[in-house]
Amino acid sequence: MRNSVMLIAVALATQFVTSLQAVRDGSNKPNIIIIMVDDMGFSDIGCYGGEIPTPSLDRLAAGGLCFRQFYNTGRCCPTRASLLTGLYSHQTGIGWMTRDQKSPGYRGFLNDNCVTIAEVLNGAGYFTALSGKWHVGQNHGITPSSRGFRRSFNLPAGGVYYASERPKCRLYLNGEQIANDDFRLPENWYGTDLWTEFGIRFIDEALAADAPFFLYLAHIAPHFPLQASREDIDAVRGKYLRGWDELSHERFKRQLKSGLISSEWQRTERPADVKAWASLSASEKDRFDHLMAVYAAVIIRMDKSVGRLVEALRERDILRDTVIFFLSDNGGNYESGSAGRTDGDPTSADSDWFCGKSWAWLQNTPFREYKHFNHEGGIATPLIVHWPAEIGRSRWTDVPAHVIDLMPTCVELAGAKYPESFKCYDILPPEGLSLCPLLRGVDELAERDLFWEHEGNAAIRRGNFKLVRKGLRSP
């Protein structure tokens, strides 16, 4: 009996020492993936009410934590700056876009008083990688490699699906510009697939180095110019002939049924400058159907790429210990007006298609306004967090959170230390809060105010109250 007890004690002690060693050497640290899409509306994916087929994301949501009230900053560059640093975008120098406006909050590039998630997680032994859109100052010399990413395959900005001679189509691999037909690229590549392919390559490098990894996968989809394959477009062509009035109503009903929104909510009415679908001619309806079908095709392909990434994690037996975040950088895009734009063939690189305001109203159901603005239609995004090791079932959370919270969340997940100084510069303390309590089932965070400003549009949220300003009025 005594020998059995001693054997059990030795086994428990050995297990404890092994666990302690795992904590020390980082072998129990989760892998972290942030997937950000571009210009996607709040209600576009299936689990947030959309009719666009997104089975891969729906599966992540079915086993993950989904946020009812998660915020971005309403525009691409500021959101990326806030995500990467945990600061409000003006603190990083990117209060607008990447043009230098000679004011500290609007220099157009990440300044020296902030650190990126990659710079912080490198210190915790993580293999850090970026694939996709950068857009935080490469035109000023601020590259992924200069801000901590050990591996990167990126566009300086975005707007690319197919290889072309357009200035936007400049590809960089680990800081070196490469040709669109470089031997390391697949033939006849499509951007959405390409970013995912390189993300998986970087994951394999991390596994070979026996290191946990942080992957920032920044998709272009579904940003304009909307471009997709004929096969993907044809799969949904005709689905949108029912029009934005009926489809918005259906999205709203699905949102109510799923519990995403409260029964007390009301759907924003169709804007005055968006025509009633019934008033359109047959040719107008066909054109708008084609336009939304291209947008849906872009999202369908993006969803397939998410499925490809998840399958790669499963094949490598690391899905359970990988935390996946999925979100959009802003709401649906109203640019090009209520008519949208349909220049050229959307299956080719030289086309120029925009959904425009009419379909953006549908995309942001049930909210007001769009990308650029600080109403909910501009700043509300789906956030799905999938982590099988900790989140075993589908859950909704009502806790308001913000893209500034991703930095402290990653820091806590990685067991990293956020620095007070870095490369001889004082670093601003993070503005966000770690979401780890929410991931582990504690459905509350400390009370705090949240803030926004972009192009004169501004907002503050305190508790359940939100004050919004639309633009600046002349005196």
Image (cartoon, rainbow, N blue to C red):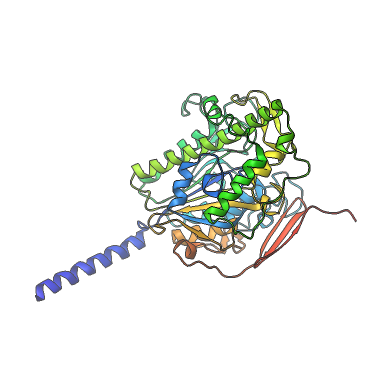
Q: Residue at x 59, y 25 (%)?
A: 347
Dividing the picture into quadrants, the one containing residue 13 is bottom left
- For this orientation, the residue located farthest to the bottom is 2
Which quadrant of the figure contains the C terminus? Answer: bottom right
Is residue 131 toward the left or the right of residue 331 in the image?
Answer: left
Residue 213: give x, y in percent of width and height. Answer: 43, 49
Q: Is residue 314 visible?
A: yes
- Residue drawn at point x = 45 percent, y = 54 percent: 64
Q: Can you give x and y, in whole percent of width and height, for residue 182 in the image?
A: 50, 26
Q: Is residue 116 visible?
A: no
Residue 219: x and y in percent read 55, 40
Res. 160 image quadrant: top right
Q: Residue 184 versus residue 234: which sits nearer the camera?
A: 234
Q: Residue at x 71, y 54 (%)?
A: 374
Residue 468 on image: x %, y %: 74, 59
Count of numbered circles on the image: 0
Q: Nearer the viewer, residue 285 or 461?
A: 285
Res. 405 image quadrant: bottom right
Up/down of 190 relative to 449, above or below: above
Toward the right, the furthest residue is 475
The relative height of residue 243 versus residue 114 in the rendered view (above or below) is above
Q: Name which residue lies at 71% across and 41% down.
A: 334
Name the residue nearer the viewer: 151 or 446: 446
Would residue 17 be found to the left or right of residue 30 on screen? Answer: left
